Image (cartoon, rainbow, N blue to C red):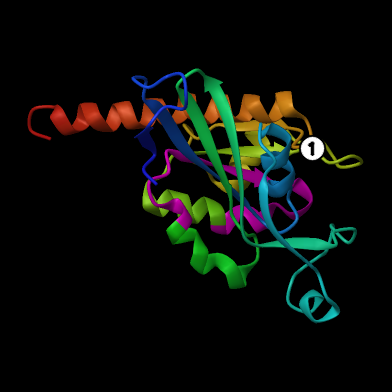
Amino acid sequence: MDSVRCEPAGPGHPDSPVLALKILVAGGFGVGKTTLVGSVSEIRPLRTEERLTEAGRGVDDTGGVEQKSTTTVAMDFGRITIREGLSVYLFGTPGQDRFWFLWDELAQGALGAVVLADTRRLTDCFPAVDFFEHRGIPFVVAVNRFAGTREHTPEEVSRALDLDRDTPVVLCDARTRASGKRVLIDLVEHAGKVHAARLLADVAPGA
């Protein structure tokens, strides 16, 4: 799916195209990707979760998320309508190393991405940060605030991840619809600036 795509409008709007934006939600194992997609989606989200088994626990690092009993094995999918004629399609990526081969397929045509981070396991989001940086896909880092964890400022997280100074870092609660929507708005605004700058660079004399 392209990041900006026009689709036929639904009944009652035969002449109005529907603009769809594709956004990825990525991050480490157990960071809250499925929760974020589910909290903001206006439709019942499509989930491809399987129960963790004892054999899987030997492969997946569950340190810090010992309560987790299921895991995404393909993707999560949700949809949110920004306004009439403009929708956002959300694709949650699997977090475990053995499912990363799916990321290239999911990333095709994405407007941008949300990289969820858990400060208890901050290194888990390094692969997602590297993935989007190397492919030039705009992203924001959203720090999911878990109960009982030490608070870190966005500046501290940015330094720890060695992010470009223009990459936004925001705090969020993936369980809350309002917080999730704020993260998506921040991403769309950031991605819009990045893509606009690239277009200007392409048309600039001598570019």
Instruction: Give amino acid for label 1.
Output: Arg
Which span is picked out in magenta? 106-127
Image coordinates for residue 183, horizontal then vertical, percent: 62, 29
Q: Residue at 56% x, 25% y: name it.
A: 81
Image coordinates for residue 97, horizontal then vertical, percent: 61, 69
SS class, disc 1 = loop
On the rendered structure, is 18 left or right of 88?
Answer: left
Residue 40: image quadrant is: top right
Residue 18: image quadrant is: top left
Which quadrant is the C terminus positioned in? top left
Q: Residue at 42% x, 27% y: name it.
A: 9
On the rendered structure, is 27 left or right of 134?
Answer: right
In magenta stretch: residue 152? no
What crowding class fits label 1: few (fewer than 14 Cα within 10 Å), some (14-19), or many (20 or more)? many
Q: Is residue 34 shown above or below 170?
A: below
Q: Residue at 63% x, 46% y: name it.
A: 160
Q: Residue at 42% x, 44% y: name it.
A: 110
Q: Is residue 51 shown above or below 133?
A: below
Image coordinates for residue 65, horizontal then vertical, percent: 84, 57
Image coordinates for residue 71, horizontal then vertical, percent: 74, 62
Front position in the image: 41 or 174:
41
Front position in the image: 50 or 85:
85
Mark 1 lies on residue: 145
